[in-house]
Image (spheres, grey):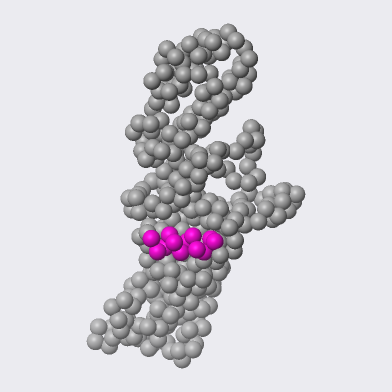
């Protein structure tokens, strides 16, 4: 009995802390432990609901120590996990990684194991969905330079929200992504999008499970990533900004994972190259407009692709050779930007 009363006191302390700024230091493991603790007390409620002596002892402890916190009845143990979840969702001090872990526990999605077989009350479920959406929409709230784990959390949450939007119909994911693009700083959004496109692919499923996943509709493993690719391909303006604003190495990594995006990226690079002309006085390739991609950036992006594993390097060199041939196959410097790029890239041409 003493051990059970100590467990009750410790969880009550956790519950009190959940409303304070101290949760800023919580990580995903701390959130999981707190929820497991709450689940244990809910189990105590189910097991000892008809045990008069234990029930009376627990209620006395609640009245003695936790009356001001609103914890006065044995029946409150049945709702302690929901109370903890609500307080954490309402607390803006909870960090992004911890919040993501909480949302995963509360909104695991279809097919996730749920031993209790229970669903959230409507109000709490709505609050969790809203916090999930706000977490994605607040892409600007984090610093530009940050822990990679936080970036991964943002990327996972973005995919989760895209998958959930897919349940509303074929147009919903695109509309959701457009709303993010229109409302928030583009640079931050594109960084998270790139991180989402680089997340590891889901593990292969047994055939029976895979068939069931296919029947489940849009919210299947990897579908969020495919929706991101479809959306980028449907928005040429976003795709151009994605390829131009993100670092060359990052775009190369994304292109290596998604062949459709690689083809568009390569097409953009060649379009940007065609806009440059050779300045005889300066001896360099320059753009006619200030927004044109400079030679140095063009070379850096082609160089990054040529340093990637096959088949990216071969495809890039083949494309450059084709452009050179269409230009007349000139060998001298300053006559064809493709010749000069191939020479700078050390292809031997």
Q: Main secondary structure of the magenta part?
A: helix
The one of 125 and 160 positioned closer to us in this rendering: 125
The part of the chain drawn in magenta is 172-183
Instruction: Give the x, y percent position of residue 99.
Output: 45, 41
Check the image and name the residue furthest to the left: 281
Q: Is residue 91 visible?
A: yes
Q: Is residue 307 visible?
A: no
The one of 173 and 230 positioned closer to us in this rendering: 173
Tell me what residue is drawn at x 42 percent, y 49 percent.
134
Instruction: Give the x, y percent position of residue 327.
Output: 45, 89
Q: Quadrant of residue 114?
A: top right
Residue 23 painted magenta: no
Q: State whether residue 215 is above or below residue 280.
A: above
Instruction: Give the x, y percent position of residue 212.
Output: 72, 51
Instruction: Give the x, y percent position of residue 227.
Output: 55, 61
Residue 178 painted magenta: yes
Q: State whether residue 22 is above or below residue 106.
A: above
Q: State whether residue 201 is above or below residue 277.
A: above
């Amino acid at each position: 009995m003493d051990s059970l009363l100590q467990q009750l006191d410790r969880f009550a302390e956790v519950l009190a802390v959940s409303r304070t700024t101290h949760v800023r230091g919580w990580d995903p493991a701390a959130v999981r432990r707190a929820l497991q603790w709450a689940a244990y007390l809910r189990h105590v409620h189910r097991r000892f609901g008809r045990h008069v002596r234990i029930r009376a002892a627990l209620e006395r402890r609640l009245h003695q120590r936790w009356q001001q916190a609103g914890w006065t009845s044995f029946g409150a143990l049945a709702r302690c996990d929901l109370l903890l979840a609500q307080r954490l969702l309402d607390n803006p001090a909870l960090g992004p990684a911890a919040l993501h872990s909480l949302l995963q526990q509360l909104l695991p999605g279809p097919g996730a194991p749920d031993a209790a077989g229970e669903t959230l009350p409507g109000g709490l479920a709505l609050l969790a969905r809203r916090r999930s959406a706000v977490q994605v929409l607040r892409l600007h709230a984090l610093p530009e330079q940050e822990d990679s784990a936080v970036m991964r959390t943002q990327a996972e949450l973005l995919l989760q929200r895209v998958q959930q939007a897919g349940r509303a119909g074929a147009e919903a994911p695109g509309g959701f992504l457009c709303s993010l693009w229109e409302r928030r700083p583009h640079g931050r959004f594109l960084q998270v999008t790139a991180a989402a496109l680089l997340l590891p692919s889901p593990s292969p499923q047994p055939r029976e499970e895979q068939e069931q996943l296919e029947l489940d509709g849009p919210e299947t493993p990897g579908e969020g990533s495919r929706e991101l690719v479809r959306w980028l391909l449907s928005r040429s303006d976003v795709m151009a900004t994605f390829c131009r604003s993100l670092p060359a190495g990052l775009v190369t990594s994304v292109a290596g994972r998604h062949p459709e995006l690689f083809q568009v990226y390569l097409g953009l690079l060649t379009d940007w190259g065609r806009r440059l002309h050779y300045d005889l006085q300066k001896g360099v390739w320059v753009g006619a407009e200030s927004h044109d991609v400079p030679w140095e950036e063009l070379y850096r992006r082609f160089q990054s692709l040529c340093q990637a594993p096959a088949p990216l390097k071969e495809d890039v060199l083949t494309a450059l050779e084709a452009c050179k041939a269409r230009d007349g196959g000139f060998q001298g410097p300053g006559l064809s930007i493709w010749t000069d790029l191939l020479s700078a890239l050390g292809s031997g041409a």
